[in-house]
Image: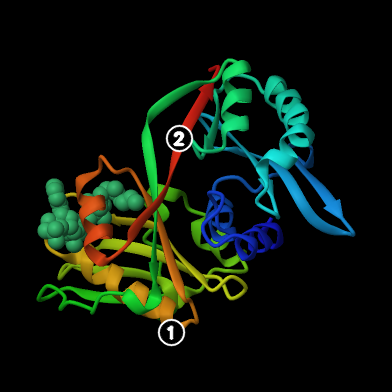
Amino acid sequence: MTRLLQAARNCSPTGGLWEAADLQWWWRRDQHPDPHHQTFWLQDGVPAAALVLTNWGDRWQCDLLSADHEPTRWLSILWPDALDQMNSLKANPVELMVRPDDLYLVEALTRAGFSVEDGDGVTAWMDAAERPPVPPILRGFELLDRSQLSNQPHHLITRNGGAVAARLSECSLYRPALDLAIYSPEGRAVTYGVFWADPVTAVGLVEPMRTEDGYQGLGLARHLLAVGLERLAGAGCSRMKVSFDPLNAPARRLYLGAGFQPISSTRNYVRGG
Ligand SMILES: CC(C)(COP(=O)(O)OP(=O)(O)OC[C@H]1O[C@@H](n2cnc3c(N)ncnc32)[C@H](O)[C@@H]1OP(=O)(O)O)[C@@H](O)C(=O)NCCC(=O)NCCS
């Protein structure tokens, strides 16, 4: 998947939805023990397209991916397999996140009984040269990265499970020095973000990012984001990417305020459950 998505990104600077790092981040939740649910198409031994099912516990996510970013060309090949596999899934709803301009996939989903859920998401990009200066951090708070804390439990455990550090360490694009957290004066990780530098595409991805309740609106995420973008640039990234819900006012203000420019949108299609 990493090779396929890196090829896709090098083929189209803003096409598709996902970076290789997105799927590496999903690895914490689903290590895909069943190879039946991951189907690849190869051209000359190189991954050219894939049908990926990710188990989020309460829903399945289905992704139809191609290395050339020509979804229309691949739809007739991937869609019959996708339908077969989605029909074989039990209990939970199946969700596809798509770009609304992917008209043939939208039409196939509508014909297959999928309906639109929630509002559209936004994907935003920034040139590394446009990154914001790092504002001062709130007095008494300290930013640390996982390379400085490797013998302490990972702060992402609470929301992402006890194996999160082990799963992250299995990911080829994960760098502990880009896994940041701001600690409160009481020693609690209250703002955190993981930054993913892809050396093949020179794209830096921000995912996830959070400030815990009670610490929001203090400029902590703004500081952490600016430090993360600085480190992504230092790691060789020429462009940065983030996706967010435009109705999430703090996230919108954080990312647009930092200089990200909305480029494309995503829409969720859901069936069953
Ligand atoms: C988005 C989030 C990370 C921002 O963290 P934060 O530490 O509160 O952010 P900051 O204090 O640095 O503020 C960033 C911007 O958001 C604004 N903001 C913060 N809290 C806000 C609120 N409750 N309502 C409206 N705006 C808010 C700030 O005013 C600032 O914008 P400004 O510079 O234009 O004034 C935080 O709200 C959060 O964790 N939300 C839940 C998880 C989430 O949505 N993550 C992002 C997913 S992509």
Q: Is residue 214 above or below residue 111?
A: below
For mark 1, give the secondary structure. Answer: helix
Q: Position of residue 173 (x, y in %)?
A: 57, 69
How far apart, in angstroms, are the residues tagged by discs 1 and 2?
A: 33 Å
> For residue 137, which quarter of the picture?
bottom left
**Would residue 214 be visible to someone looking at this image?**
no
| Residue ID at (47%, 76%) | 238
Q: Is residue 30 left or right of residue 211?
A: right
Q: Residue furthest right?
A: 44
Mark 2, residue position? 267
Q: Nearer the viewer, residue 195 or 30?
A: 195
Vertical relation: 270 (above or below) 230: above
Instruction: Mark 1 and mark 2 in contact? Answer it, CB < 8 Å.
Output: no
| Residue at image location 58% in from the left, 70% down from the top | 201
In percent of the image, x 52 and y 37: which residue is there? 97
- Give neighbour class at mark 2: few <14, some 14-19, many 20+ (Cα, 10 Å): some
When asked about the image quadrant of residue 139, the answer is bottom left
Q: Is residue 42 left or right of residue 228?
A: right
Q: How is the image coloured?
A: rainbow
Q: Is residue 117 visible?
A: yes
Q: Amino acid at mark 2?
A: Arg
Q: Position of 60 compared to 205: left or right?
A: right
Q: Secondary structure at mark 2?
A: strand
Query: What numbered label is drawn on residue 234?
Result: 1
Q: Name the spot of residue 148 as percent of width and height, x first.
A: 39, 80
Place of residue 191 in the rendered image (x, y in percent of width and height, measured from the top left): 26, 62
Q: Count residues near mark 1 (Cα–Cα under 10 Å), then give few for <14, some for 14-19, many for 20+.
A: few
Q: Amino acid at mark 1?
A: Gly
- Ligand 1 closer than 8 Å to label 2 CB: no
